[in-house]
Amino acid sequence: MDWSFCDKVFYIGLVAGILGVAIEGVFCVMKYHRWESHVTTVWGWYNIVYGLGATVLYALSVKLNIPSLFWKIVVMTVIVTAVELGAGLVLKHWLGMKAWDYSNRPLNVAGLICPLFSLGWAAMSLGVCLVCDRLTAWLEPLTIPELHVFAAVMFAVLIVDFALAMICVFRWSRRHYGKPALTVAGTIADKYAPDEWISNRFIEWRFLDEKESMC
């Protein structure tokens, strides 16, 4: 396995996940005159959507062996849009929830993807491709063996953090739809991540109405 590449991908995702929360928070201050922390973890200041999006785009820009920049951007855009659609379908059909809604956008698909935001993915794909070599060079000093241990530990922490968040969100959904906890983990989540706390933590997540819900 190319551990140097794995480390680079990790650092890209780590920075993007934190930076995305900061940028969106500033945007909310400018637009709504209030700070909003759009995190997706139970600890810390991190959004896995931004982190995963950045890692996927960087990995594709490095690994896709497509000579034409245009077609490379097209392929990257299709893949990331498919990931966005898949994540939205999981939220909708498994949890009966949504974290974004493009229903008011032209030519949207189930309110989960739309051409306008796919063009945004295309623009980001182009940007990542143009700076990919420079990013790789900047990250090279961070791939030394001593820092590989740090990256591995931090990755494990993020995985645990996200797993706990998903348990809490799952129980949030089950409680909303009147389902009792059937496991010890669910009981603990009910105690330490009640509705008020988790709704303040996952501020953009909303439940579907009964007609939309597949739960």
Image (cartoon, rainbow, N blue to C red):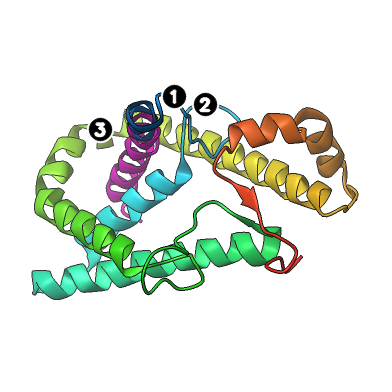
Quarter of the image for residue 28 reads top left
Disc on the earlier residue, 1 or 3: 1
Q: How crowded is mark 2: few (under 14 residues within 10 Å), some or many (20 or more)?
A: few
Q: Whole-percent x and y of residue 162?
A: 58, 42
Which residue lies at the image location 87% right of the left edge and 41% below the top edge?
Answer: 184
Task: Using the image, determine if residue 109 lies above or below residue 96.
Answer: below
Amino acid marked by disc 2: Gly
Disc on the earlier residue, 2 or 3: 2
Specify the segment rendered in magenta: 1-23
Q: Is residue 34 magenta?
A: no
Amino acid marked by disc 3: Leu
- 55 on left or right of 113: left
Between marks 1 and 3 in the image, the one whose residue lies nearer the viewer: 1
* Quadrant placement of the C terminus: bottom right
Residue 66 visible to an observer of this rendering = no
Q: Mark 2 points at which residue?
A: 44
Which residue lies at the image location 40% right of the left edge and 33% below the top edge?
Answer: 21
Q: Which of 52 and 3 is in front in this view?
A: 52
Amino acid marked by disc 1: Trp
- Tag 2 and tag 3, C-beta contact below 8 Å: no
Q: Whole-percent x and y of residue 120?
A: 26, 58
- 166 on left or right of 178: left
* Quadrant placement of the N terminus: bottom left
The CA span between labels 1 and 3 is 32 Å
Q: Which mark is residue 35?
A: 1
Quarter of the image for residue 135 reads top left
Q: Whole-percent x and y of residue 192?
A: 78, 28
Q: Is residue 10 magenta?
A: yes
Q: Which of 197 and 103 is in front in this view?
A: 103
- Main secondary structure found in the magenta portion: helix
